Image (spheres, grey):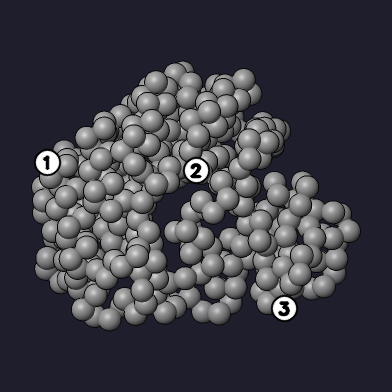
C-alpha cells in the first residue's frame, strides 16, 4: 500500500495548474495538520491499512513552503500514527522555499527523495508559467539538497509551453542533466479545465501544435537517454534503480490512501475523493471523521482499462493478461506497423508508438 498526503498551499497559484491549491490566506495551518493526522489515525484504526506502507508521498500545492515547525509537527504525527517502517518518503518542493537549514530538516524528518518543481531553467518561460523561483535558485536548490545529504532528487520539467523555443527547451534539458539529479520528469504541457491557460487557449492567445509536442518529446528523449537516463515511462527518466517507486505502485494498481483535501483513495476496489475545500475538509474531519464526497466501485473491467492506459506508458509494457478481450487483429496491426512489439508476455510500444500511447490504448480497450 502507498499513501499520498495533499498539502494545498502555494505562495502563488500557477496559471497552468489544475490541482486543488490556494494561498494560505487565513487558514489555520495547525488545524489543517491536526485534521490530516486525525484522518490518518482514523484510517489506521478502521483497518484500511491492511498492508505495509511502501511509499509515502507529500504533494501539492507546495509542501516545502510549510514552516519548519509545521513540517516537524506533521512528520512526527505521521510517524507516530502510521506504520512507516522502511517506508520510502518523497516530498515535493519549490526551489524558492528552502535553503540549507530547511533541506537538512527534510533529511532529518525521514525524506528520502525530493521532487523539485522546476519546470524550466529559462527566465521568460518561468514568467509565463507564473513560477516564483529563478533559474539560479533552481540550480542552487539541487546543490543545497545534495549538501544536506538527500538520497534522491527529481527535477520536473515541462515542454510545449507558449513562447518556449526548441533552444529554450534544450537549455533546460542540458542544465537539468548538468545538475546531476537521479531522476527527471519531462511533461508535455496539457491545458486543463478551470485554469488560466485553458481560457487563453480558448480565446486564441495560446495554440497547441502536435508537431511541437512531438519534436520536443523526441528532443527530451535523445538528450536524456544520451546522458545515461533510462526512459522507463512516457514522461519519466531515471538513473538505474532510481525509478519513482510511488508512481510505479500507482501504475501497477496497488491500493493507495489519500489524505488531505481533494485527495483520492482506492482500497479493495472502492475509490473515493475528499472534499476539495480546505476549510470544509477540516470541519468534516472534526465533525464526522472523514471528508468523502465522491465514491465509486472499481470493477474488474474498469481496473483492466486503467492498467492498459498506465502500463502501456512504461518500458516494461502491458502484460497480455490484460489483452484477453482485445481482438488479435488489433494487436497484429500494431506489430506490423512497427509501433509495438511483444517482449515475452508483454506488449511494449516502440518507435512512433511511444508518442501515440493514448490512441493505442483506446484501440486495445
Q: Is residue 68 above or below residue 83?
A: above
Residue beneath disc 2: 182
Look at 62% across and 47% down and name the residue there. Answer: 230
Nearer to us: label 2 or label 1: 2
The answer to whether any part of residue 203 appears in the image is: no
User: Measured from the top left, where is residue 194 in percent x and y?
Assistant: 40, 43
Quarter of the image where the N terminus is located: bottom left
Q: Disc 1 on helix, strand or loop?
A: loop
Looking at the image, which is closer to me, 292 or 28?
A: 28
Looking at the image, which is closer to me, 91 or 163?
A: 91
Q: Earlier in the sequence, mark 3 or mark 2?
A: 2
C-alpha span from label 2 to label 1: 37 Å
Q: Is residue 66 above or below residue 323?
A: above
Residue beneath disc 1: 26
Nearer to us: label 3 or label 2: 2
Nearer to us: label 1 or label 3: 3
Amino acid at each position: 500500500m502507498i499513501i499520498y498526503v495533499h498539502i494545498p498551499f502555494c505562495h502563488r497559484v500557477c496559471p497552468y495548474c489544475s490541482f486543488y491549491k490556494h494561498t494560505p490566506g487565513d487558514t489555520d495551518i495547525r488545524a489543517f495538520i491536526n485534521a490530516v493526522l486525525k484522518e490518518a489515525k482514523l484510517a489506521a484504526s478502521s483497518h484500511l491499512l491492511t498492508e505495509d506502507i511502501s511509499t509515502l508521498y507529500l504533494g501539492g500545492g507546495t509542501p516545502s513552503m510549510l514552516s519548519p515547525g509545521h513540517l516537524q509537527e506533521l512528520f512526527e504525527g505521521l510517524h507516530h500514527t502510521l506504520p512507516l517502517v522502511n517506508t520510502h518518503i518523497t516530498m515535493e518542493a519549490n526551489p524558492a522555499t528552502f535553503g540549507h537549514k530547511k533541506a537538512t530538516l527534510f533529511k532529518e524528518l525521514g525524506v528520502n527523495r525530493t521532487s523539485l518543481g522546476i519546470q524550466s531553467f529559462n527566465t521568460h518561460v518561468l514568467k509565463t508559467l507564473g513560477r516564483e523561483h529563478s533559474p539560479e535558485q533552481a540550480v542552487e536548490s539541487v546543490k543545497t539538497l545534495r549538501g544536506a545529504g538527500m538520497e534522491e532528487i527529481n527535477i520536473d520539467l515541462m515542454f510545449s509551453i507558449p513562447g518556449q523555443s526548441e533552444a529554450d527547451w534544450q537549455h533546460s534539458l542540458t542544465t537539468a542533466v548538468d545538475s546531476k539529479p537521479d531522476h527527471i520528469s519531462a511533461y508535455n504541457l496539457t491545458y486543463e479545465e478551470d485554469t488560466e491557460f485553458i481560457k487563453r487557449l480558448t480565446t486564441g492567445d495560446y495554440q497547441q501544435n502536435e508537431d511541437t509536442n512531438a519534436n520536443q518529446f523526441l528532443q527530451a528523449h535523445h538528450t536524456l537517454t544520451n546522458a545515461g537516463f533510462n526512459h522507463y515511462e512516457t514522461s519519466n527518466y531515471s538513473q538505474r534503480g532510481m525509478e519513482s517507486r510511488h508512481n510505479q505502485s500507482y501504475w501497477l494498481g496497488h491500493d493507495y490512501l489519500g489524505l488531505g483535501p481533494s485527495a483520492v483513495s482506492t482500497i479493495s476496489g472502492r475509490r473515493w475523493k475528499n472534499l476539495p475545500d480546505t476549510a470544509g475538509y477540516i470541519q468534516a474531519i472534526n465533525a464526522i471523521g472523514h471528508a468523502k464526497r465522491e465514491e465509486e466501485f472499481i470493477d474488474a473491467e474498469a481496473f483492466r482499462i486503467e492498467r492498459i492506459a498506465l502500463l502501456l506508458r512504461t518500458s516494461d509494457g502491458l502484460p497480455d493478461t490484460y489483452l484477453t478481450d482485445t481482438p488479435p487483429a488489433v494487436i497484429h496491426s500494431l506489430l506490423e506497423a512497427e509501433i509495438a512489439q511483444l517482449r515475452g508476455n508483454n506488449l511494449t510500444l516502440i518507435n512512433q508508438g511511444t508518442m501515440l500511447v493514448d490512441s493505442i490504448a483506446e484501440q486495445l480497450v
